[in-house]
Image: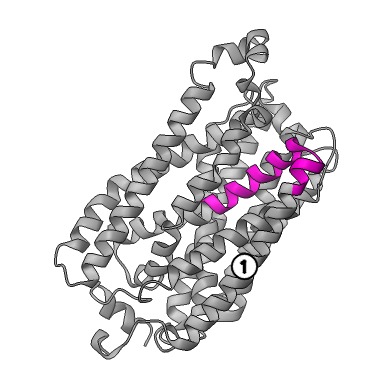
Amino acid sequence: MTAAAHDFRLSDQLLAGIRSRRSRAAIVGVIGLALLAAGFFLVSPNQFYRSYLWSYLFILGLGLGPMAWLMLQYVTGGAWGVMIRRPAEAATRTIPLLLLLFLPIVIGINNLYPWAHANLVAADPVLKHKASYLNVGFFLIRAAVYFAGWLLLSWLLNRWSLEEDSGSSTAHARMSKISAPGLIFWCFSITFMAIDWSMSMQPHWTSSMYGLLFIAGQGLSAIAFLITVMVLLSRYEPIRSIMTPRHLHDLGKFMLALVMVWAYFSFSQFLIIWAGNLPEEIPWYMARLNGGWEYVALALVLGHFALPFALLLSRDLKRNFKLLATIAIFVMFMRLVDLYWYVAPAFSAASFHFSWMDIAAPAGLIGIWVAFFLYQLEKRPLLPSHDPELEEALEHGR
């Protein structure tokens, strides 16, 4: 069936479903953020910022990860990318919200990062040595550069996508042309963002693998999220009559690949540091493998790698809409656990500590982000009617 025979606009049933889910997500988000605000004023500002940071890093991956998949599809082509293009575009249009939600981290710099305290820097030779890079002014400048690049890429890709829908014959070529340097910028910006916003919480510790772990993690969070969205959309027209098990199989293979890449990077970092046994590096792992944190590490080995890896080896499972969506949701949950394991021990290394704000923060931020994402998703048809690979995507698996 040709593209002209399809109407890619959201059906009334789908639109009603999206708006219902958007309302529920917004309610969860508002309640979560209200509880988090109460925790700030009534319990502990320090715990507020710690819970907020790792939760924010998770939704950052949901907004920025799809941008990488979008640009990768423009560079490489393929029917798989046409199917997820509109949800990925909607995710990139949430970056202004991510910029707004970054403000609490700016306000809480002194609560999160020891290098932000002049007295600590003056008394610590390591912090003094790194002060030319780790200082509040340069930190904010770098953050502004990251967001400026992300916003520019999002704006151009979404603007040219609209032009393509209007029949522009050059829009797709422009999107392909900007995607190659855009991917390079994305990789570098995610690497330095990971160093600035996460690794620098413990500025005496460094790892050259840290940025790669965040690149793989964001890619995995994004593809798991996009699979979940596509399975939900496949319950309604127009996606129900278009999406085939083969489309889903392709996306499942990407998720399997990212599970393995994340595991490879994680084990490589652990092996190099553990074998080196240097006093500057090993304490980071010692804090995360003792005092109860070792059980979280074991959960990551089993839940972030072993279980999804074993399940995703099955071809039939990757073609099963319900089962693959269940695994994708589980993978996203383990991404939350992974980020918690990275951030929380920096503040409670002696023993495992879990606060009720560690539930309120992800609930609030994810709820607000998902509501805004769904608002963006309903704005455009679910498939690009003038994409040069649309016909191939429609025939894929038939």
- The stretch drawn in magenta includes residue 173: no
Coordinates of residue 121 in the picture (x, y in percent): 63, 13
Would you say 43 lies left or right of 63 here? right
Q: Residues within 10 Å of mark 1 (few under 14, many from 20)?
A: many
In the figure, residue 378 lies in which quadrant?
Answer: bottom left
Can the viewer see residue 320 in this picture?
Answer: no
Q: Residue at x 23, y 74 (%)?
A: 386
User: In what quadrant of the picture does the C terminus appear?
Assistant: bottom left
Residue 309 rendering spot, x and y as whole percentages: 61, 63
Amino acid marked by disc 1: Ala
Could you tell me which residue is drawn at 69 percent across and 25 percent down? Answer: 277
On screen, residue 204 above or below 239: above
Horizontally, is 226 left or right of 203 in the view?
left
Q: Which residues are magenta?
A: 38-60
The residue carrying mark 1 is: 25
Q: Is residue 292 visible?
A: yes
- Give the percent coordinates (x, y) of residue 243: 42, 82
Q: In terms of secondary structure, what is the magenta stretch mainly?
A: helix
Quadrant of the drawing holding the N terminus? bottom left
- Residue nearest the observer in this picture, 299 or 103: 103
Query: Which element is circle 1 on?
Result: helix
Residue drawn at x 36%, y 42% as measured from the top left: 149
Residue 46 included in the magenta stretch of the image: yes
**Along the line of sight, the residue nearer the viewer: 237 or 14:** 14
In the image, residue 152 sits, relative to residue 229, either above or below, namely above
Name the residue at 46% across, 57% down.
94
Residue lying farthest to the left in this orientation: 169
Write down the quadrant of residue 304 in the picture: bottom right
